[in-house]
Image (cartoon, rainbow, N blue to C red):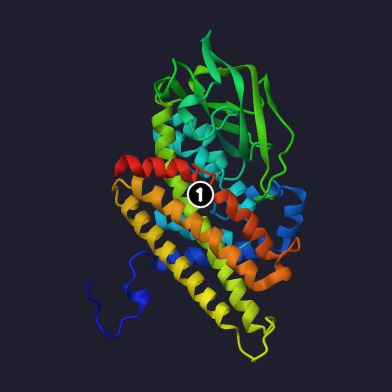
């Protein structure tokens, strides 16, 4: 590929246009006003105020990438990437994960739901009036989705649910749960998706989990004890759930890769700021060679990971199958994130170890990115199958 002389990178790069940059400025202003000043308090409290959903909904942020017909703000896949990148600048992946739980909960409704389901369970979520969560993981079935055991048996126009879900992001406060259940026999063909509302009798929520990272997002275990869910809450057809989940995983893995890239970027930026402020002790008056080399490595890895993820996203946006590539990108981005945040801690030393420091939080939050949406081992299995 050749470019005309005199053109800047911004003019030749292929991912973002004026509309994306306008969105970027709008989301950044929202983060600066509504999120960043309060992150430390929310991290300590283990959740952010429910009102933030409403504010983000009214600002059109929750609806980015979703059809305007159902209350969304429109935009392509790179509009969503812009939104995630700018939200991550608040410095708390937990806030981003909590606000973004709708992004793994409502796509199956948009893909296979009825018009009535979309009006009831999509539009209010995009407006920030309801909180949506996804319920797949179980104590005995984490990354092995086909092994879930929560049952849903048809009875008198309803499904009777028994079982439970665990490690559910936004699970403490969710008004609705896009829930994987077993309506048939063993294996993936027996799995369906149901929309379960939190007010359903027999639906209960455990205590809020204390976690290594993502402190500002509420995470819970959810139980179903004979919960009767109307049959019209079935998403798609019986037995279609596994396919909808797999389809949903691709966008989730993309967002996690973007979050990982931003975690690395923030760690790099914080390290450069640290050096420019002259806080690194030096006998010669300049940075030690190992620090210069380490920063060069950090910048190289962050750039490579970002460009890889953008390229995969562009192909996804064009409708090209990227199951293998997004699995690669997620693994690579999470590995880069862990490496870069660790190196940033080396540069800062004890200053960054204390609670409340941005790097301490980035380091903790980074570790979760390689687990959510499928562990690195599961990603490798996906990649291997395509090889």
Residue at image coords 53%, 56%: 259
Q: In this rendering, does residue 240 appear at all? A: yes
Quadrant including the C terminus: top left
Residue at image coords 58%, 37%: 133
Residue at image coords 47%, 66%: 302
Which of the two residues, 210 or 379, is positioned nearer the viewer here? 379
Q: What residue does disc 1 label?
A: 63
Q: How many marks?
A: 1
Q: In this rendering, does residue 83 appear at all? A: no
Q: Vertically, is 234 above or below 70? A: above
> For this view, does 122 lie left or right of residue 74?
right
Secondary structure category for the residue under label 1: loop
Residue at image coords 77%, 49%: 45
Which of the two residues, 260 or 341, is positioned nearer the viewer here? 341
Q: Position of residue 233 (x, y in %)?
A: 51, 23
Res 79 → quadrant: bottom left
Q: Position of residue 343 (x, y in %)?
A: 58, 67
């Amino acid at each position: 590929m050749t470019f005309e002389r005199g053109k800047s990178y911004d003019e030749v790069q292929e991912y973002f246009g004026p509309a994306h940059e306008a969105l970027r400025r709008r989301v950044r202003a929202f983060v600066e006003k509504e999120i960043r000043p309060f992150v430390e308090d929310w991290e300590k409290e283990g959740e952010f105020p429910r009102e933030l959903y409403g504010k983000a909904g009214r600002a059109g942020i929750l609806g980015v990438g979703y059809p305007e017909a159902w209350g969304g703000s429109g935009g392509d896949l790179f509009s969503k990437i812009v939104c995630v990148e700018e939200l991550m600048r608040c410095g708390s992946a937990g806030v981003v994960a909590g606000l973004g739980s709708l992004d793994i909960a409502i796509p199956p409704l948009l893909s296979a739901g009825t018009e009535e389901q979309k009006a009831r369970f999509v539009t209010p979520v995009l407006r920030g009036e309801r909180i949506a969560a996804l319920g797949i993981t179980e104590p005995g079935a984490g990354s092995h989705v086909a092994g879930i055991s929560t049952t849903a048996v048809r009875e008198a126009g309803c499904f009777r649910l028994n079982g439970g879900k665990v490690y559910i992001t936004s699970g403490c406060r969710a008004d609705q749960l896009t829930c994987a259940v077993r309506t048939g026999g063993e294996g993936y063909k027996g799995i369906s998706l149901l929309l379960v509302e939190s007010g359903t009798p027999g639906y209960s929520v455990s205590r809020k989990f204390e976690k290594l990272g993502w402190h500002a997002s509420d995470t819970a275990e959810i139980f179903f004890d004979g919960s009767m869910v109307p049959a019209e809450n079935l998403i798609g057809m019986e037995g279609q759930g596994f396919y909808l989940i797999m389809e949903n995983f691709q966008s989730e893995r993309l967002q996690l890769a973007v979050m990982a890239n931003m975690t690395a970027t923030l760690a790099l930026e914080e390290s450069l700021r640290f050096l420019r402020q002259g806080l690194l002790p030096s006998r010669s008056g300049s940075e030690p060679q190992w620090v210069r080399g380490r920063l060069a490595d950090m910048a190289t890895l962050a750039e490579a990971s970002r460009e890889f993820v953008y390229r995969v996203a562009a192909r996804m946006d064009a409708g090209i199958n990227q199951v293998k590539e997004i699995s690669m990108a997620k693994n690579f981005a999470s590995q880069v994130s862990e490496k870069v945040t660790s190196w940033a801690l080396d540069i800062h030393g004890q200053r960054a170890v204390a609670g409340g420091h941005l790097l301490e939080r980035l380091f903790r939050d980074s570790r979760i990115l390689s687990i959510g949406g499928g562990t690195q081992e599961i990603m490798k299995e996906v990649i291997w199958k395509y090889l």
